[in-house]
Image (spheres, rainbow, N blue to C red):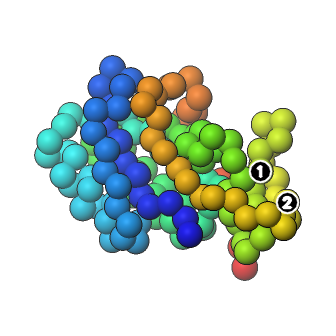
Amino acid sequence: MSSPLLVGIYNKNRLIKSYIKSEKTSDILPVVFDKIVHDYTIKNIYFANGPGSFMAIKIAYVFLKTVSITLGINLFASDGFLFNGNKPIRALKRVYFVKENEKIITKVSKKEFEQKFELPDLLEKKKFSQNCEPLYILPAV
């Protein structure tokens, strides 16, 4: 099972509020952001642009890109390994994305890896890039 949607609010690079939602990204992301834009002034958006579910990646990217353009704020991305301690990320059944020498590849594993993602307590902005396009590692089926 994959991790739920995690959204964090950072002030001076420190996590001050988090939202953990189990609903589908397409259903819950607009609801969470509606609350956030009413409660906070957003200066930047940082997100994981993959690897993972193609649909969730596309939805997050299109939604967040639209928000960044509409509100005139910066959008930054990093791969999902930043949020799971650099552990393998499930691609399909026993196939996992792994990061080796800064390159993301797939590997088959007999071992099953826990799919736990967490928001960092301290946001390290230098680990993010303005190259925010989704990381599509596997070809579309």
- Would you place residue 126 above or below residue 130 in this image? above
x and y percentages locating residue 108 in the rendered image: 85, 65
Residue in view at x 73 percent, y 64 percent: 112
Q: Nearer the viewer, residue 138 or 13?
A: 13
Image position of 88 (left or right of 46): right
- Residue indicated by mark 2: 107
SS class, disc 1: strand
- Residue indicated by mark 1: 98
Pointer 1 with pointer 2, Cβ within 8 A: yes
Quadrant in which the C terminus is drawn: bottom right
Q: Nearer the viewer, residue 41 or 23?
A: 23
What amino acid type is highlighted by mark number 2? Answer: Lys
Q: In 3D space, how far apart are the residues under numbered discs 1 and 2 (Cα atoms)?
A: 7 Å
The reply to whether residue 72 is visible in this rendering is no
Q: Nearer the viewer, residue 102 or 15?
A: 15
The reply to whether residue 57 is visible in this rendering is yes
Point out the residue furthest to the left here.
38
